[in-house]
């Protein structure tokens, strides 16, 4: 029997700002307080707290990265044959067993727990795939603007499926911008060729951008309050990454989003998260 999927919106759905304000979300940065990290060093935790991100962390061998790429190649072909596009593979951990295996992967989870603590939930998995010359950019934004969750204790792991560099439009971070709190954004117009639908204007007033170049199999990690984006891919090479979203189990998700959450480490004492099983489909 196939697994029934809970009715959960994806991260591109704009929730009216008033509705999110009604939730009285705590959108302050909550630094890592881990004393004895297992996967990250103390210096890396200090950097994450200061800058809001880490990049270039080696996670998978070249053979493992090649296997991830072959899997995505087949999945993308299937989705596009069904009328989807290279950005439409979202909430993938609830649909595909192989993606569930990645969001619960011990090596990834160990890095996340060093930041979030012992009780951690994985709640999002979305492939961001910029095809060669697709012309779409991702405007400066904060992930927290899209999510009806509180407090702001969410970490995104960006797993490079392809090599990601300046030429094929790697992500860009603005270090330290997570300390500015929740920033004002505007709706993006169609002619901006923006993959998302929010833009934080004058983002570079918060600092100089850093290019997040990654080899396939490496990861970056960033806070949900960090300003980030990417330019259009004008190269002849694809640029794909899998975003894996995690939060502390004590975070509360509204509007049905708790249906996405899988307990990847520790426990959820209050039973807030649905903790769905691994999908049968691979």
Image (cartoon, helix red, strand yellow):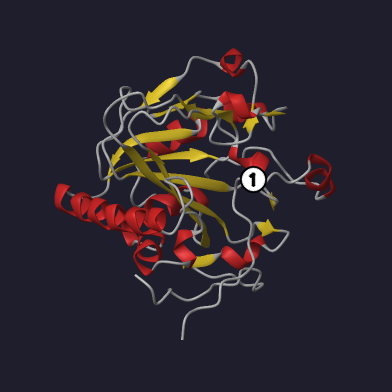
**Where does residue 104 sit, x and y in percent of width and height?**
40, 63
Q: In the visual, does 189 lie left or right of 160?
A: right
Which residue does the image show at 71% across and 27% down from the upper left? 186
**Where does residue 165 sit, x and y in percent of width and height?**
30, 27
Taking 101 as reference, is 276 above or below it?
below
Q: In the visual, does 24 lie left or right of 191?
A: right
Q: Secondary structure at mark 1?
A: loop
Tell me the crowding category of disc 1: few under 14, some 14 to 19, or many 20 or more residues within 10 angstroms, Cα based.
many
Nearer to the camera, 157 or 31: 157
Which residue does the image show at 31% across and 33% down from the upper left? 164
Nearer to the camera, 91 or 88: 88
**Where does residue 151 sit, x and y in percent of width and height?**
68, 49
Residue at mark 1: 152
Which residue does the image show at 65% across and 44% down from the upper left? 146
Taking 109 as reference, is 13 above or below it?
above
Q: Quadrant for the C terminus, please.
A: bottom left
């Amino acid at each position: 029997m196939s697994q029934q999927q809970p009715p959960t919106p994806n991260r591109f759905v704009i929730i009216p700002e008033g509705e999110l304000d009604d939730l009285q979300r705590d959108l302050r940065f909550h630094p890592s307080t881990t004393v004895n990290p297992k996967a990250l060093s103390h210096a890396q935790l200090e950097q994450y707290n200061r800058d809001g991100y880490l990049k270039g962390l080696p996670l998978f061998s070249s053979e493992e990265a090649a296997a991830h790429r072959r899997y995505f190649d087949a999945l993308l072909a299937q989705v596009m044959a069904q009328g989807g596009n290279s950005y439409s593979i979202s909430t993938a951990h609830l649909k595909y067993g192989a993606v569930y295996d990645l969001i619960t992967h011990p090596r990834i989870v160990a890095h996340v727990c060093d930041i979030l603590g012992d009780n951690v939930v994985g709640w999002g998995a979305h492939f961001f795939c910029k095809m060669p010359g697709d012309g779409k950019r991702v405007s400066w934004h904060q992930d927290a603007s899209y999510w009806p969750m509180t407090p702001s204790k969410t970490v995104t792991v960006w797993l490079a499926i392809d090599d990601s560099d300046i030429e094929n439009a790697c992500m860009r971070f603005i270090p330290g911008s997570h300390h500015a709190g929740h920033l004002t954004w505007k709706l993006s117009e169609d002619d901006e060729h923006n993959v998302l639908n929010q833009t934080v204007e004058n983002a570079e007033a918060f600092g100089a951008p850093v290019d997040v170049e990654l080899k396939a199999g490496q990861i970056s990690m960033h806070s949900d309050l960090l300003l980030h984006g990417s330019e259009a891919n004008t190269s002849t090479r694809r640029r794909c990454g899998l975003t894996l979203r995690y939060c502390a189990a004590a975070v509360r998700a509204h509007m049905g989003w708790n249906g996405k959450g899988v307990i990847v480490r520790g426990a959820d004492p209050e039973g807030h998260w649905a903790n769905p099983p691994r999908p049968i489909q691979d």
